[in-house]
């Protein structure tokens, strides 16, 4: 790993403007909620606030990662990139109004990155391939398959056997998946050929670690507050505009909660660092499947509604299809714009089917 630049700076103009805008939109969302205006208006403004706050979380995470190094930076980006979704889901479980999707179709995220890389670097007479570290590609492919198994078996057990012990199966499976996620992190940090992130070293001045941590904590706390407002409008919005809860959970909320992570990943891919972009994208998906979803099973014990890993068959089939194509593309150690288009096609098919559920 190269030398990390130790020069620090404060917020630049764009960052200051972004923080101010996020504060204004968040305050507007809170004010509208207190004023008891139309639920659809509160939903739209609170969603915009979550997007703005997610962007601040992403910037603060990136700056904190610049101080800690690229390996820690990749994990931090994946972790806090999922913060908005995790918090929204906790409030939704507490309200008993919404089930968490087993895995958002992360094809959209990595597909866009593959596509952007291809359009950026395929203008010459010969198409170029983005090289992905084979060891990491194989590990991610196998972990994606295990995630599908871990989330699919409890569903199969519940739907086929119709057994009363489905909650017990979910609880034990959640514990196994969480253990596997911890082991994956240990392996990642202790295996040089997997942990090395080629080319993505922080350049130029960055925020001091304390400032980055302060902004990160404040923005994440604000996400928690606005998430409560956002979740409070869901049932009314579903009724008012006729959108399905499944489409809202699988498509809309991931777009709202992951805007910062997706923009960072696309920017990195555009800079010809698909290795790090894959680390952020697939690492986030694995974190959802192996970390967040199982953690919600245990977090739900603190709420009136116990969460399990029993999902609709349609979602499990979509999960298996997304995992299959993503693992197939990631395992060969190469990527190009056509593969990005293939992933986007799968995402479009799933989104279309979900819309009509």
Image (cartoon, rainbow, N blue to C red):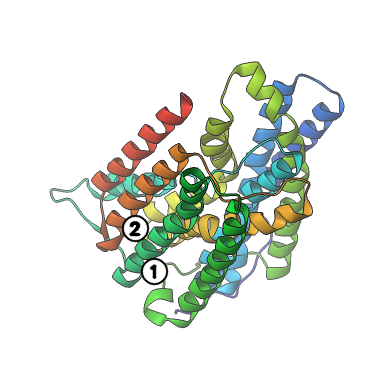
Front-lying residue, 90 or 47: 90
Residue in the picture at 59% in, 18% down: 242
- Dots 1 and 2: beta carbons under 8 Å? yes
Q: Residue furthest left?
A: 125
Q: In the visual, does 72 lie left or right of 227?
A: left
The crowd level at tag 1 (other Cα within 10 Å; few <14, some 14-19, many 20+) is some
Give x and y (percent) for residue 101.
Answer: 54, 43
Front-lying residue, 70 or 21: 70
Q: Mark 2: which secondary structure? A: loop
Front-lying residue, 170 or 49: 170
Residue placed under numbered mark 2 in the picture: 272
User: Dividing the image into 4 quarters, which one contains the N terminus?
Assistant: bottom left
Quarter occupied by residue 331: bottom left
User: In this picture, is 77 found above or below 134?
Assistant: above
Give x and y (percent) for residue 239.
Answer: 66, 19
Q: Is residue 289 visible?
A: yes
Residue placed under numbered mark 1 in the picture: 199
Residue in the picture at 45% in, 40% down: 313
Q: How many marks?
A: 2
Q: In the visual, does 153 lie left or right of 240?
A: left
The crowd level at tag 2 (other Cα within 10 Å; few <14, some 14-19, many 20+) is many
Front-lying residue, 291 or 21: 291
User: In this picture, is 314 found above or below 268?
Assistant: above
* Separation (CA) of disc 1 from disc 2: 9 Å
Q: Is residue 12 visible?
A: no
Residue in the picture at 84% in, 23% down: 36
Quarter occupied by residue 78: bottom right
Give x and y (percent) for residue 64.
Answer: 62, 66
Give x and y (percent) for residue 116.
Answer: 35, 45
């Amino acid at each position: 790993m190269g030398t990390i630049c130790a020069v620090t700076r404060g917020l630049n103009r764009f960052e200051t403007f972004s923080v101010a805008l996020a504060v204004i939109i968040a305050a507007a969302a809170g004010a509208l909620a207190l004023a008891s205006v139309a639920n659809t208006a509160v939903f739209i403004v609170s969603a915009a606030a979550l997007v703005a706050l997610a962007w601040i979380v992403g910037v603060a995470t990136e700056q904190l990662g610049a101080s800690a190094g690229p390996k820690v930076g990749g994990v931090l980006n994946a972790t806090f990139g999922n913060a908005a979704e995790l918090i929204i889901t906790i409030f939704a479980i507490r309200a008993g109004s919404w089930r968490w999707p087993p895995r958002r179709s992360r094809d959209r995220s990595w597909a866009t990155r593959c596509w952007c890389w291809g359009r950026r670097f395929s203008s010459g007479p010969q198409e170029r391939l983005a090289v992905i570290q084979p060891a990491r590609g194989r590990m991610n492919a196998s972990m994606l398959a295990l995630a599908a198994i871990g989330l699919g078996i409890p569903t199969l057990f519940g739907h086929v056997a119709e057994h009363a012990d489905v909650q017990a199966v979910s609880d034990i499976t959640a514990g196994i998946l969480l253990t596997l996620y911890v082991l994956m992190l240990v392996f990642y940090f202790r295996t040089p050929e997997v942990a090395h992130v080629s080319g993505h070293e922080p350049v130029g001045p960055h925020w001091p670690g304390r400032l980055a941590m302060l902004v990160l904590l404040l923005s994440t706390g604000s996400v928690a507050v606005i998430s409560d407002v956002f979740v409070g409008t869901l049932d009314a919005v579903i009724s008012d505009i006729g959108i399905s809860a499944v489409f809202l959970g699988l498509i809309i909320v991931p777009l709202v909660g992951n805007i910062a992570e997706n923009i960072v990943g696309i920017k990195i891919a555009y800079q010809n660092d698909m290795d790090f972009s894959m680390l952020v994208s697939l690492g986030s998906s694995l974190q959802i499947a192996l970390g967040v979803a199982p953690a919600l099973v245990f977090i739900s014990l603190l709420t009136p509604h116990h969460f399990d890993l029993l999902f609709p068959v349609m979602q499990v089939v979509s999960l298996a299809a997304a995992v299959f194509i993503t693992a197939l593309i990631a395992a060969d150690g190469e990527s190009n714009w056509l593969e990005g288009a293939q992933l986007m096609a799968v995402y479009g098919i799933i989104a279309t089917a979900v819309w009509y559920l």
